[in-house]
Image (cartoon, helix red, strand yellow):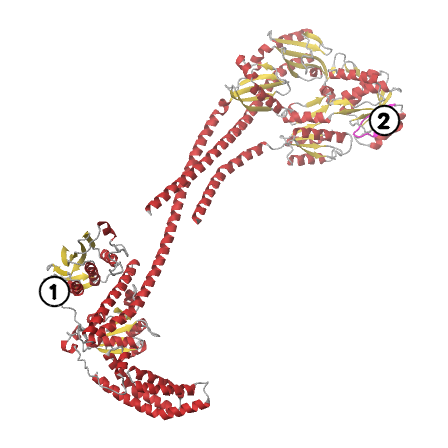
Amino acid sequence: MNEDGFSLNEKYIKKIILQFATVLGILILTGFSLRAEVNDLLNATLEKMIAKQAADLSIVAEEKFSKELAELKLAAEYLSAHPNDAAIEKNFLAMLQAGDENISVGMLSLNERAIHGKMISKWDFLRFTSVYRGNEIVDYCAGKGMLFAVPVMRGGNVRAVIYRLYNEKILTDLFGLAEYNSDAKLLIQERNGQIIVPYKNYGEADKKFFMNSTIQLGFKRIRDNLATRMSSATYCESSLGKFFLFATDLPQTNCTMIGYVPWVAVAGDIFRIYTLLLIGGTLMLIFLALVSAYLFVMRTKAEESDALREAKQAAEDANNAKSVFLAGMSHEIRTPINAIIGMNEMILRESDNPEIIGYAQNASAASESLLSLINDILDFSKIESGKMELVEENYKLADVIKSLITMMKPRAEKKNLAFNLQVNPATGNNLFGDSVRIRQIALNFLSNAVKYTRVGSVDFIVDGENISDDAINLKFTVKDTGIGIREEDIPKLFNDFERFDAKKNKNIEGTGLGLAITNKLVAMMNGKIEVQSVYGEGSVFMVTIPQKVIGNEPIGKFTEEHAAPSKKYAPSFIAPDAEILIVDDNEMNLLVAESLLKATKIKIDTALSGMSCLKKLTERHYDLIFLDQMMPSLDGIQTLKMARAMGDNLSKDAPIIALTANAISGTREKLIGEGFTDYLSKPIDVKLMEQMLMNYLPTEKIKSPDAEENLPVEEKSEPKSELINVETGLEYSAGMTDLYKDFLLKFVSLKADKQKKLQAAFEAQDWKNYTIYVHALKSTALSIGGEKVSAAAKELEISGKIITAATSSELEKHESMEFIEKNHAATMKLYDELTEEARRLAETL
Amino acid sequence: MKRIINTKIFNMLVAGAVFLVIVLPSMFVLSFTREFAEQKEKIGFIILGDIKVAGWNESQYKGIKAACENFGIELLVRDKVKENSGECPAAIKNLAENGASMIFLASYSYSREAQNLVKEYPKIAFATNSAEVHAKNMTAYFVRMFQARYLSGALAGMKTKSNVIGYVAAMSNTEVNRGINAFTLGVQRTNPNAKVLVMWTGAWQDEVTEAQHAERLIKSGADILTYHQDEEATALVAEKFGVDYIAYNAILNTDSEHYLTSVVCSWNLYYTDMIQRYLKGELNSVKNHWLGIDRGAVMLSEYSSAVSPQMISKLDSIKQELMNGKLIFSGKIYDNAGNIRCEEGEAISDDTLLEDINWLVKGVEVIE
């Protein structure tokens, strides 16, 4: 079981790890794909950002160009205002040139003739014609430089053109735009791709950069984009590294500004942040995964415990069903056993035949053993369901020991075992505890010892260790020289239903529950059991139970004063002055109870129902009442409550003891809770009933039994009778003479009334009732052995039935009526004679 | 067994949930950003006539449609929008509401009508074909149609026998006057003795008046007609009377030899250039844009069989001059009242040509 559980667990952990790894794998894959996506997204965003910056740069460049043009325009306006003044024109142009040899200026007429300075070819500067139409231009020609030109107007007409041409060499200084990012490189290019404005340290490395095929592809992509956009940027991963390339067309020119910036300079920091976020996110996800794994495990555990709980519930339900079944069965079994025991008791009491007594004793032993098995099972079911409780009271240790000896010594002697008793005289005698259970515990060890010992002895040692002023550890030690127990078996000793050496001990009786019950009882009493055993040599069982001591009377020297069990039953007391009432709806039960208590000479009154019980309670005082719990109409509890509430109850203070066939645990509390003084389980055990009476009857009414009175003289010579067959009568009285006598007397007492009714029915020709009455006569007569009367009554009953039957013919009816009329008187006479006979017989019994 | 299934389902659910939690939001974010980037541009186009009727309206519409398709831009058209009726401002508002980021005002008077409204939409780029109104976010846009007029005038000068050429024109404004002047200068280039008779119809579209005027011009001795109207009534009259004619702004669906050629412009190129400038953010950086014959923006359509190879050769050489930058309005130019408009060694500037031509050159006679 444990190993199985472990392997399952390992498998389970493997499964969880696998699942965790799968989830983690998914996360990592997702992370990678996300990383690529985010990377692309980031680069796309940066491309846009850089393109925007490039557009801004183009505006800056445009402003620089505008400034340049504005200067020229100013000059052109001045020249427009002063036409045809060559000196002024020259002066102005010299000013515009500012003495820089890299700047050339000039003024051209419309018929493409230079007024001042050099001629400009419209084939070099393609946009130049536009000046003649009155527009300002910025135009670049590779190798020539950058041209700025404005028209000189006369009204709405263009009169001439002035220009300023910058040599390529100085373009860097003039328009090499301040590097907007220290890592970025910028240059201005003709729209068709010719590099025109190199940045200052433009060198071989930069040329190499622009010649790189990947970079060129990137710029081609940008040029395509520029068809519809002001600016464009692209991310480029070349053999030279990762770069952002960008370009923007300068408005109103034929120029493009291009540039590049290393990827790290732009995206490095952002990417670092992103990486941090990614790592953080990944950690969070791993944490999440761990948490979910943990939750998963917890959930599975919870599920398992749910399953366990369900299983436990199912087991408990099954166990309850078992308990109920056991209780029911035990009840069903106990009822017949008690009948057996009761009848057997009667045999023992009333028989003088030693053989019969011997048989009865065997039957008694067997029944007792069967009953103890049933009781074991009941106890076990109580313990199992946790319903076993201790009934603690004051008791005398000596009584317990005495009863144990009484029970065990004969058994030991029967097996030729020496039974040695050793009692520490200093042990306190008056103790407080559950004496019944203590006796049960000791009895269990003792009977085991006797059971498992073939040769040798059984020693029973009783001792008491003081543990405080008012408590001792009561110690029973049972030593035997029996078969012993293997060392490895000792721990299993107290397991349920466990028996060792099954083969060897197969003829040993018992449920195997004894030690289990004992162990649990000892545990309930906070005691402990020690076992020492040598296999094959014998065992020692030591049980220690703490008990309270009342007073300090020691047990003293315990003498084995016990006698051999008497062959004859003797009541433990007599109480001729006591009067009790027994209430039961079953006449037979009443009769058994009355019979069993006859020896105590208690005056017994009976009632067949709750109602009649209540009635009797108002008529007379009873010292004790036995009240059946289960009765039709008014049940025991209802009767009890009404009796307690009744004002004219003469026996208000009398203890009321419940009689119940319900032997399952919990019954006692329930009944006592309802107001009963105590309860007695049915069928009645005469010893327990006597015990109950001794406990609850007023002590002044209890007397020691008179030995002489105890032995009723059996009359061997039974008077012969013609009308009564005594054997038959005794048969119907289960062989009990007393019972038979009661039956006889009852028959006599009922006769007058019954005969009167019979006669009345006969005279009134009420055949229906007549048939019922003769039927009753037939049965009651037979029950006392009045065979003749019974037979006569039977014939009358048959005739009555014919008369009342709907299927009978008139003739049949008539004949039957005649038969009754003829025989009625004779039967009545026989009835009278039978009654006389019965009375006589009863007196002799 | 039941528990195993439950566990499996639970695991699947957990895996699914983790996947969804991680992947869905990121997909959403990514797709959102893409969507954001892919917002489509819309261009609005407002025109006077019906875009299904051949002539000025249809040729313009076809041009802008092709241009928009080139750039993958959505075109929102509002046609039959009458001038000076309040319909144009309403159309502008409507287009702005519909998300147009650029609006063409494709009729001459629209820009004046919309003058104040344009300022209310500073984020919308406006383009107009009228140079009369300027705004920060509105640029005038033209083709140098007069270059093609000049070329057609050269053809007419070579072709006329009566030395009288009829010109049906809508009204006297800078655009029409510029066309008449360029045409006349072209005629005088090949035939200094020819004169051009002009009649005003007073409207861009008025078939009846146009037909009456065309007839009258023919009766006045014109053996070649041309016109500056949105539709082709003049051409039909010329055809009817068996007179040669040069059409305007539409390639007519006829193989008549009287139909010498058409003065046409490539609206496709025109609008493509304009939209490209808009997309590049350069559109509104200058007041005017003027596309010429050097860019292929204007041209003469295929000549009829009545045009001799010699004539064609002459025309080709003149066309080449123009493409090389020849200025039509340069050198000594007198108006028909005898005032000098351009001195030797001067050229009339674009600004003047666009905004301030209220005279007709010497050689033009206006018939009232």
Check the image and report above or below for B68 versus A656.
above
Q: Is residue A228 magenta?
A: no
Q: Nearer the viewer, residue B282 or A581?
A: A581
Q: Is residue A779 visible?
A: yes
Tag 2: amino acid: Ser
> Which stretch appears magenta?
B223-236
Q: Are marks 1 and 2 in contact (CB under 8 Å)?
A: no
Q: Is residue B345 left or right of residue B196?
A: left
- Residue labelled with disc 1: A560
Q: Position of residue B199 (x, y in %)?
A: 84, 26
Mark-to-mark CA distance, 1 and 2? 161 Å
Check the image and report above or below for A845 versus B117.
below
Which quarter of the figure has residue A15? top left
Check the image and report above or below for A608 versus A521.
below
The label nearer to you, 1 versus 2, is 1
Q: Is residue B359 visible?
A: no
Tag 1: amino acid: Glu
Quarter of the picture holding the C terminus of chain A: bottom left
- Residue labelled with disc 2: B256
**Residue lying at 74% horizontally and 25% vertically, measured from the top left:** B266
Q: Is residue B234 magenta?
A: yes
Q: Position of residue A84 (x, y in %)?
A: 71, 9
The chain letter for the residue carrying disc 2 is B
Q: Nearer the viewer, residue A480 or B46?
A: A480
The chain letter for the residue carrying disc 1 is A
